[in-house]
Each structure stands twice: as C-alpha cells, then as structure tokens.
Image (tube, helix red, strand yellow):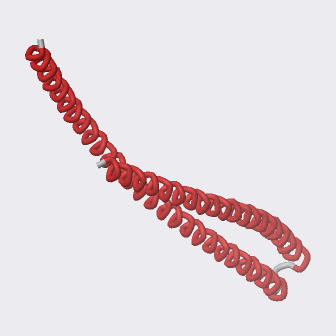
C-alpha cells in the first residue's frame, strides 16, 4: 500500500516537474513574443518617422506647387507640374497605407500568438486542478487508513492486556 502511494506521489511529482518544464517553455515563448512585440514597436516607430518625413515632404511639395503656381500662372504647363507632384504625393500616401496595413497584420499575428499562450495557460491551470483533486483524495485515503490501523492496534493492545491479566490471574 505504501509502495502504491509512493508511486502515486512520485508520478504526481514527475507530472509537476513536467508541468514546470512546460511553464518554463511557455515563459520562453512569451519572452520571444514580447521580443517580437518590441521589434514590431520599433517597426511602427520607424514607420511613424517615415510618415513624418513624408508629411514634411508633402508640405515641401505643397510649397513648391504654390511657388510654381505663383510664378508660372495658370498655364497648362504649370498645371501638368502640379499634377505630377500630386501624383507622387498620392503614390507616397498609397505606400504609407500599405505599410500601415502590414503593421496591422503583424499586430493581428501577435494577438493570435497571445491567444494561443492564454489557451496553453488555461490548459495548465486545468491540469493543476486535477492534480490538486487527486492529492486531496490521496490525503483523505491516507488519513482513513491511519485511523483504521490505529483502531486495530489499540484493539490488539486491549486483547493483549486482557490475555496478560487472565494469565496472571491463573498463575497466582
């Protein structure tokens, strides 16, 4: 019986070690995800800097367009130049929109990874609940066994005392 209980305790300890290793592995993965989030933050910062530069270029281009309009007037040639500048600005804005779309996709991937990590933690929590339940059951069984054995030992001691007094009575 003790061997069975010891095996169960050893199995629970092994399971606890495995769970600890899984948690350590998950913590490493969470660290990697955090590192990826940090890298994505750097990418977003760089993108914001590029957007600022592009906005500055837009202001500069707008100023250039205004100067051209003042110097040349309302000729077809100046209109063509303005249109060219505006097309480039639109191209820049389209590129910026594409970059924001890519950043959004990367954030969605990070969110999915966090959801997977949360699911894994939920599974580990469920395992711990099962382990706690089996430990409680084993503890209850152990206490019941100890009480039964104690009662049996006390009963045997009373029988032994009775036999001793009876033998002492017949001897005297």
Residue 26 or residue 110, whichever sits in front: 26
In the image, residue 99 above or below residue 75: above
Left or right: where does residue 69 sit relative to residue 157?
right
Tell me where residue 36 sits by quadrant: bottom right
Q: Quadrant of residue 122?
A: bottom left
Q: Residue at x 31, y 49 (%)?
A: 134
Answer with the quarter of the image where residue 159 lies.
Answer: top left
57 on left or right of 92: right
Rendered location of residue 79, percent (x, y): 79, 83
x and y, in percent, of residue 41 in the image = 69, 60
Quarter of the figure that contains the C terminus: top left
Q: Nearer the viewer, residue 40 or 144?
A: 144
77 vs 81, nearest the viewer:
81
| Left or right: 110 in relation to 50 | left
**Left or right: 6 in relation to 76:** left
Which residue extends farthest right?
71
Q: Which residue is outermost to the front?
A: 171
Q: Nearer the viewer, residue 157 or 22?
A: 157
Residue drawn where x is 48% and y is 64% of the image: 116
Q: Is residue 73 above or below residue 26?
A: below
Looking at the rendered structure, the number of numbered marks drawn on it comes to: 0
Q: Residue at x 18, y 29 (%)?
A: 151
Where is residue 17? Give x, y as percent: 50, 55
Question: What residue lies at 78% left-to-right and 84% top-to-bottom?
Answer: 84
Q: Position of residue 142 (x, y in %)?
A: 28, 40
Q: Is residue 90 above or below residue 46?
A: below
């Amino acid at each position: 019986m003790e061997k069975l209980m010891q095996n169960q305790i050893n199995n629970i300890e092994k399971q606890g070690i495995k769970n600890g290793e899984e948690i350590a592995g998950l913590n490493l993965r969470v660290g990697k995800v955090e590192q990826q989030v940090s890298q994505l933050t750097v990418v977003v910062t760089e993108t914001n800097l590029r957007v600022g530069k592009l906005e500055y270029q837009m202001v500069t281009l707008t100023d250039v367009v205004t100067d051209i309009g003042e110097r040349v007037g309302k000729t077809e040639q100046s209109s063509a130049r303005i249109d060219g500048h505006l097309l480039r600005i639109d191209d820049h804005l389209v590129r910026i929109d594409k970059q924001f779309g890519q950043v959004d996709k990367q954030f969605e991937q990070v969110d999915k990874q966090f959801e997977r990590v949360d699911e894994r933690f939920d599974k580990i929590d469920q395992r711990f609940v099962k382990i706690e339940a089996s430990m409680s059951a084993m503890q209850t069984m152990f206490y019941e066994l100890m009480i039964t054995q104690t009662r049996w030992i006390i009963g045997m001691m009373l029988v032994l005392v009775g036999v001793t007094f009876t033998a002492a009575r017949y001897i005297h």
